[in-house]
Image: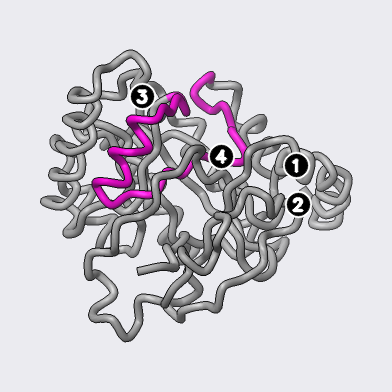
Amino acid sequence: MKKDQLLTRRRALLAGAVAVGAAGTAGVVALRTGGTPEAPSAPAAGAPARHLPEKPSAYRLQPLTGYGPPRAAPRRPPVRHEPLLRISGRGRTMVLTFDDGPDPRYTPGILDTLREYDVRAMFFVCGEMASYNKDLLARMADEGHVVGNHTWSHPLLTKLRRGQIRSEMERTSDVIEDAYGERPQWFRAPYGAWNRAAFQLGAELGMEPLAWTVDTLDWTTPGTGTIVDRVESGAAPGVVVLSHDAGGDRSQSVRALRRYLPQLLDSGYHITVPRRQYT
Ligand SMILES: [Zn+2]
């Protein structure tokens, strides 16, 4: 697609993207920009300020720098009542997330494309998959990606007892720490099905809940072109994109990334990973 076509379409669809933020329960999270701590920034366009913490200063104390190495364990995050859905930051920033892996059939292809374009992404891994593919978590660490906790076996958390939820989350954080080198700071509930116990236990384990803004629905294998279209149509400042690198045949997801990533970059998007701004 020509760049001008892409831009025209994006302009046409920006209104839709803003509507997602306005209609949704959008929490906002701050961005990492090249390792330099950023001052607290305003919510992304379209992100309703009413969803920010009531006392933002309580959650935006100091950047990590100056309080020890960047990998020092962060202080326990607040217990939220809804997941974060988008990110804040200056300019056209977006986050790409890949769930359910790692899978040796698809994850390496995604990592190859990200490396080719020097882009960092988030991988919400399942502990069970991670336990069989620790080498892929090590590669994610080497290449600067962020690994989040997506439970051990991908259950519907709302059907589990509290102790079971804790076990699903804790075991996964343990295997991530072992293979990736640090405990995860982000958590995503399978199927986006959150409950109070998940928010409480996630905070207890040092994790923030991150959902998404744009769902590619790639797991329905709608065709590579459709996945590309959904990402490009949904592209807007602050958007978090959901795709999958495991859980079925994900070859379309791998091929789609090869197409939409260079197009997003050509359109001026900065693809990055979020950082937590309080310590
Ligand atoms: Zn999932």
Q: Marks 4 and 3: which is nearer the front?
A: 3
Please tell me which of labels 4 and 3 falls first in the chain. Answer: 3
* Residue occupying image coordinates x 55% and y 61%: 55
Q: What stretch is highlighted in magenta?
A: 191-220
Please tell me which of labels 2 and 4 falls first in the chain. Answer: 2
In the image, residue 222 lies at what x, y percent? 60, 21
* Residue occupying image coordinates x 42% and y 77%: 62
Q: Which residue is under mark 4?
A: 256
Q: Marks 1 and 4: which is nearer the front?
A: 1
Q: Which residue is under mark 1?
A: 22
**174 part of magenta stretch:** no
Label 3, label 2: how many angstroms apart (C-alpha)?
Answer: 33 Å
Q: Marks 1 and 3: which is nearer the front?
A: 1
Q: Which residue is under mark 3?
A: 247
The correct choice, above or below, for 177 with respect to 25 in the image is below
Q: Marks 2 and 4: which is nearer the front?
A: 2
Q: Which residue is under mark 2?
A: 46
Q: 58 or 66, which is in the foreground?
A: 58
Quadrant where the C terminus sits is bottom left
* Residue occupying image coordinates x 71% and y 43%: 21
Crowd class of label 1 (few under 14; some 14 to 19; many from 20; radius 10 Å): some
Label 2 CB-ligand 1 distance < 8 A? no
**214 part of magenta stretch:** yes
Amino acid at dot 3 = Gly
Residues marked 2 and 1 touching at CB (< 8 Å): yes
